[in-house]
Structure formats: C-alpha cells, structure tokens
Image (cartoon, rainbow, N blue to C red):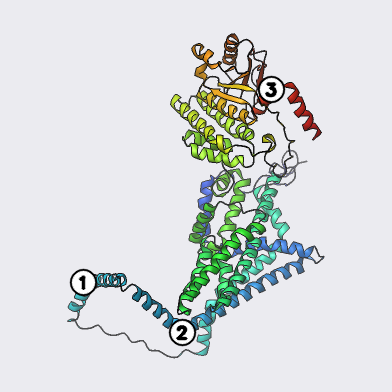
Amino acid sequence: MATGQEDGQGRLPDSPKGGPLAGAPIMPESLPPLLVLLGAIVVLYFGRDVFMPLAIAVLLTFALAPVVSLIRKSGIPRMPAVIAAVTAAFIAISAFSFVVVTQVSELAQQLPTYQSNILSKIRSAKDSGAGSGIVKRITDAVERVGKEISQPEDAGKAAESARPSPPILVEIFSPEKPIQLLTSMILPLVGPLATAGLVVVVVIFMLLEREDLRDRFIRLVGYSDLHRTTEALQDAGSRVGRYLLMQLVVNVTYGIPIAIGLWLIGIPNAMLWGALAIILRFVPYIGPVISMVLPLFLAVAVSPDWSLVLWVAALFIAMELISNNVVEPWLYGSRTGLSPLAIIVAAIFWTWLWGPVGLVLSTPLTVCLVVLGKHVPQFRFFEVLFGNEPVLDPETRLYQRLLANDPDEATDQLDELLEEQSLIEVYGRVAIPALILAERDRARGVMNAEQRESVSATARTVVANLAELAEPPPGLDEAGKGEAPEDGEEAEPNRVLPSLAGRRVLCLGGRNALDDASAAMLAQALEHQGAAASSASFADLEPARLRALLVDQPEAVLVCLLSRDSLRHGRFLVRRLKRARPDLRIGLVFWRDANEAGGADESAAAVDADFVVHDIAAVIEALAPAEAASGEASRAAAG
C-alpha cells in the first residue's frame, strides 16, 4: 500500500533508483547560457576573495593528483600519500618564496651603489647626441612645455602670497611601543598566511575526497548522460594536470639555466632573476619579456659599458629559442587545446577579474571552459571561440574562400593538404565536395548566375595554380600517399589505382559553370595518372560546336554533373554524343560526397552510357584497360 509520500506505484519521487527524477540534473536547464555566463562573471568578480583561493586549490589538486596516484602505486595508503605530496609541494613553494624575498631585500640594499653607473650612461648618451643636437632639442622642448604648464600656477601663487598664510598643522610624534611595532609588522602578513593555510587545507581534503567529489559533481550535473560527464571530467583533469606539470618542468628547465648564465655573466642576484623567470613564464607571451627586462635594467646599472646588456639579451633569446623549439615540443605530448588569440584574450579577462593571480591562472581556467564547451552543448561557443580545432570542415572552408573570390588562400589550403594526401584524395575529399555545396546553394536559389560564374572561375584558377604545386615526386605512387589514420581509426588498405598512360580523355561540364570546374579538376587528376586529359565547358556541347570538340579523337568522354536532379539531362547529353560518334566511349560522373546516398536509377543502362561513376578513383578504374586493372588489383591483394 502506497504511503502519502509515495506515488501510485510505491516509488519515492526523489529516489535515485528508478524514480522519475533519477538521472535528472539538479541545476536548472531553462536559463539561457548568456545569462548564466553573466551571472557567473558577476559572482566571480565580487566574490574573488573566496574564489581565488578555491581556484588555486583546485588547480593544485589537478597538478598533485598524478603525484598522489604514483605514490599510492608503491603501496602507501591514501592519507600518508596525500600528506607527503602536499607537504613536499608547499615546502618547495615556501623555499622558493623565501629565496625570492631574501634576494629582493638584498637587491634593494645594493641599488644605491649602482647610481654612478646609471648617471655615466646617461651622460654618455647625452654626449653622443650633442653633435647632432637631438638630446638638447628634446630637453629644451620638454622644458618649454613645463614652463607653459606651470605659468598659470605661478601667477596664482603670486596673487595668493599677499594673503595671510594658513595655520600650520603640527603632528606630535611619539616613539612606538614594542607591542605596537610588532602588531604593525604581523598584521599585514595575516591575510596572505591565512589564504595560504586555507589553500593547503582545501588541497588536502580535495585529494582525500577526490572520488566523493567526482560523484557529487556527477549527481549535480545529472547522471542520465554518465558517459559524457565522465569524459568531461577525465578530459579536464588530464588537460589541466598535464599542462601544469609540463609547464612547471619547462619553466624550471628555463629558469635554472637563466640563473646560472646570469651568475656567470656577472649580474647580481642571479637566483632572483631565475626564480622570477620560472614564475613569469606561467604568464603567456608577456611573462618571458618581463623576466628579461628586469635583468637588462640591472645590467645597465651594474656595468660601466654596454657589454653586459648584450650578453643578457643574448642569453634570454637563446633560452627562448631552445625552450620553444626543443623543450616544449618534446615534453608536450598534446597541447592545451587553446588558440594563441584565446590565450591572450583569456589573460586580459582574468587579469581584469582577479588581478595578477588571474593572469597566472588564465590558461588553466580557460582550458576548463573549453572542456565545458566540448562536452556540454549549451556552452559549445566556448570551444568555438577559444579552441584550436578547426571550426569549419575543409570542404566548407574551401567553399567559403571560393565564395569570397580568394584563389590564393584556397590554393594555400589545398597545398597544405597535398603535403599529406595525393591530388586525387584532395580533390575527392575536399574540392569536389566544396563544389557540391555550391551546387546545393544554386539549387536552393541563394546563388545567382554572377556568383556561380565567380565561384567557377575561382575554382578553375585554383586548378591552374595547382598544376605546378601538385606534381608528384618521381617514384611516388600518387594513390598511396594518403594521410595516416587518426587515433582510434583503422587504417584503410591502400587503393592502388591503375595507370592511364596513353589514354586520351575529354572531361566536359554537364550543365553549368560549376560542372565545368569539376571537369577541370577531374582532367588534372587524370593527367596525374598518365592520361592525356583535357577539359571543356558545357557550352561546347551545343550541336554547332560538338564536332570541333571531338576533332582530337578522344577515346572516352566524361560528362560531369554535380546536381543529382540532372539524370534526364545527362541521358540527353549521352545520346547527343553517341549520335556524333557512335564508337565513342561515354561515361557519366555524378559527383557524390561520402555521406550522400544514391538517388534515382543511375545505372549505365538507365542513361544509355557506357559507365556511371561517382568519384575520381572509380573514373580511373573504369577508364583503365581490363588487363591493367586486374593486374593492379592482384598486386594490391598480394601486398
């Protein structure tokens, strides 16, 4: 019998097993993502005193979690492993901070001794510009501007001098007592020490309760899609943890040689500048520049000439080249997934939000946002804005460049693809699908005749540009150059295509200028297989021009059609060509992308053609002699 708190079937509404709310997210899904984002920014800004320590603790937890797991693999229980990892980390941070503080204090005491060198360099710079008068003219201009600015103020002061002077405030000074002096020294340290203690405690508890926190997060966001939630957690943990650890290793391998090099050069407080280089290199792009500027100023102050300045600049430049081109590519098995512009924008945003701490935390925090956008559809714009993955498919990107009448960038795109793929693969996977997109826009009525002609002309220009760029190296099988399979994908067997040496082929556009562009691409691909191929426009299929078109006696004619609704028109063209030359071998090429299913009956008998194909490889196989095709097939099977 159901109680008053149960439904008619005897189930509790809030039961996590089988109830109607099972798997439902606790957080509301009805709020617009933009409103949620604005609310989060406001909360993070006004609650920065609370959220900054928590953010630091979470990131340190990500960094220390692999260390704790490594310690536990040796048989040590969780509690001692966590305490050991956290203690070692914060001892290292404390020792690092102590070195920095002592070095800064020592530098402050030594600065007055460098005053004479600075003044001598200023005098030398002034003397070097005395001949041309540049320094003198700049100084005189500054003085005149200063006089003009101070003139009204001086007149006002002369008028006020006649007035009686106001009474002078006198402050009675009494020496501070020891307790007051101690209080004034300790109170400024209470806040940072309390924050550091809070971070330590939070890191310890997060590492101890890591599995429980994971389960609570899953319950919070909803476990109806457990696979996506688990993948998001693993992705965020691996990206952030790998970034922090690898960045720390890179920074240490950068800062220690910097400190040693500055010590050998003779720059005072070399340990301080090496430590600052380690810290500032967490700041993207501008951090290394700041870490170099400070030792450069000190080199100016220390040395009576300019030799130390040049040595310091050379040291930093050499270490940057080694770190960027050798150490980072070697250590980073995978990148953070952020674009360079996203890193700069994130640094600006988090600095405005949380100050210098936000600048250091900007990259890992933005990585978390990108992971959120990757796995949560409502926040997909984070991945689009900040991610480094291409947001457009190659064929869509090429079509956009064709629409923009930009053959240079379109050629560059295909040229990059040709480094990993053959010309036949690039045309079949990218260029022809781009023309199919254009044909679909034409069929929908969103592309006028002028735009169609422009796209076709740009595509033919790209084909002409690739005539030299796409030459296959001697001895390279054009069909076996395909790109390597991605992780998790099975490698397809190489499709060895037969040679078409000695074949004379004519490729024709079937119905419009877009078909002409596809025919030009097909002709160039056939030339790479050894055929004597040429292309012509659909306008040349008019009866008055047809005989002139066939004057070169081609062995085969290929009619290219991008529209799937052109079946009847294709049959009409085949019959016209057959009447002109009954012995001519005619093939219809109905272009089809990889995800497109077949339409109406496209068999050769249905359109009166000798063969009907849908891609470049099928065209080559259809044109090859029977003995050559069978020989290539047997060699491929034997391989």
Decide: marks 3, 1 in contact (CB < 8 A)? no
Please state which of the two labelled residues, at mark 2 or mark 1, is closer to the viewer: 2
Mark 3 vs mark 2, CA separation in Å: 87 Å
Rendered residue at 50%/32% (across/down) = 461
Q: Is residue 111 visible?
A: yes
**Which three-letter amino acid code belongs to the residue tagged 3?**
Ala
Please state which of the two labelled residues, at mark 3 or mark 2, is closer to the viewer: 3
Question: Which sits earlier in the primary sequence, circle 2 or circle 1?
Answer: 2
Question: Which sits earlier in the primary sequence, circle 3 or circle 1?
Answer: 1
**Which three-letter amino acid code belongs to the residue tagged 1?**
Pro
Residues packed near mark 1 inside 10 Å, few (<14), some (14 to 19) or many (20 plus): few
To which quarter of the image does residue 258 belong? Answer: bottom right
Q: Which mark is residue 622?
A: 3
Q: Which secondary structure lies at badge 2?
A: helix
To which quarter of the image does residue 530 belong? Answer: top right
Residue 534 position, x and y percent, is 57, 24
Q: Which mark is residue 113?
A: 2
Rendered residue at 61%/39% (across/down) = 418
According to the picture, the residue beneath numbered tag 1 turns out to be 152
Looking at the image, residue 133 lies above or below residue 175: above
**Which three-letter amino acid code belongs to the residue tagged 2?**
Thr
Question: Which sits earlier in the primary sequence, circle 3 or circle 2?
Answer: 2
Q: Nearer the viewer, residue 50 or 83?
A: 83
For residue 253, side relative to residue 19 (left or right): left
Q: Is residue 294 visible?
A: no
Mark 2 vs mark 1, CA separation in Å: 40 Å
To which quarter of the image does residue 398 belong? Answer: top right
Rendered residue at 71%/28% (across/down) = 498
Rendered residue at 52%/71% (across/down) = 312
Decide: marks 3, 2 in contact (CB < 8 A)? no
